[in-house]
Image: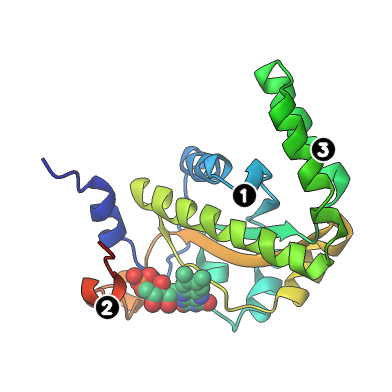
Amino acid sequence: MKNTDFLDKLNARYATKAMNGEVVPQEKIDTILEAIRLVPTSSGLQPFEVFVITNRDVKAQIKAIAWNQAQVTDCSHLLVFAAWDTYTAERINHMFDLTNKIRGFENEGWENYRQMLLSTYPQKAAEENFQHAAKQTYIAFMAAMTQAEYEGVDCTPMEGFEPEALDKILGLHEKGLRSTLILPLGYRDADKDWLVNLEKVRKPMNELVTVVD
Ligand SMILES: Cc1cc2nc3c(=O)[nH]c(=O)nc-3n(C[C@H](O)[C@H](O)[C@H](O)COP(=O)(O)O)c2cc1C
């Protein structure tokens, strides 16, 4: 039997263009955040943080630097994904120490892997490290969008904002973070949403997949 549950969710979700301001219950927000927490990341470093914005004034400030996209203020909760601005020894050690604490043992192979990362990542240019960390936020972004669909919550994936301006609004520089993505979560305003009834457009499989037998 074909399992299409996940595919059905991917088909049903869409980049909501208008939201009605209705508040999303905290339990739903919590499962969306848990999906973000559970995503796999390179070396398990989880090199990002997520900010949950419900404050009206802060949302309004963000809208002004996000192409004035209405969902930023008409959403219930605005998620901001922010990646580490670089990899430091402290950040790497924190995640490896946490692994040892949670698993309750140390392992030579794992410790060797820690040393390998410590001898490579922190020495690289901050921008290169940030770009690597930023990629990890896209994994979390997709998990958040899909879990939102399972919760019956609409959302709009957004890169359409000025990251440096957003970093200033949230004081991310001081936290060693840089914003990468934002995700308004809320409920559609179907009457005002030009996309809600349009067919989903995706290229055909033969333009996407090449099989090498
Ligand atoms: C990384 C990313 C950034 C996006 N940025 C915006 C944005 O700033 N504003 C917007 O309205 N839609 C944005 N979109 C939505 C895409 O245009 C939309 O996902 C795509 O056209 C497919 O349509 P669908 O999501 O409705 O299936 C973004 C999507 C992704 C994945």
Marks 3 and 1 close (CB-CB < 8 Å):
no
Q: Name the foreground residue: 137 vs 128.
A: 128
Residue type at mark 2: give it: Glu
Q: Quadrant of residue 123?
A: bottom right
Left or right of 138: which side holds 105?
right
- Give the colour scheme shown: rainbow
State which image quarter holds ligand 1. Answer: bottom left
Q: State whether residue 63 appears in this view.
A: yes
- Residue 14 coordinates in the image, percent (x, y): 35, 67
- Residue 177 coordinates in the image, percent (x, y): 78, 59
In terms of sequence position, does the residue under pointer 1 or pointer 2 come before the other? Answer: 1
The residue shown at (46%, 51%) is 143
> Which residue is denoted by mark 2 in the rendering?
207
User: CA separation, marks 3 and 1?
Assistant: 15 Å
| Disc 3 element | helix
> Which residue is denoted by mark 1 in the rendering?
42
Q: Could you tell me which quadrant the N terminus lies in?
A: top left
The residue shown at (64%, 60%) is 80
Left or right of 131: which side holds 203?
left
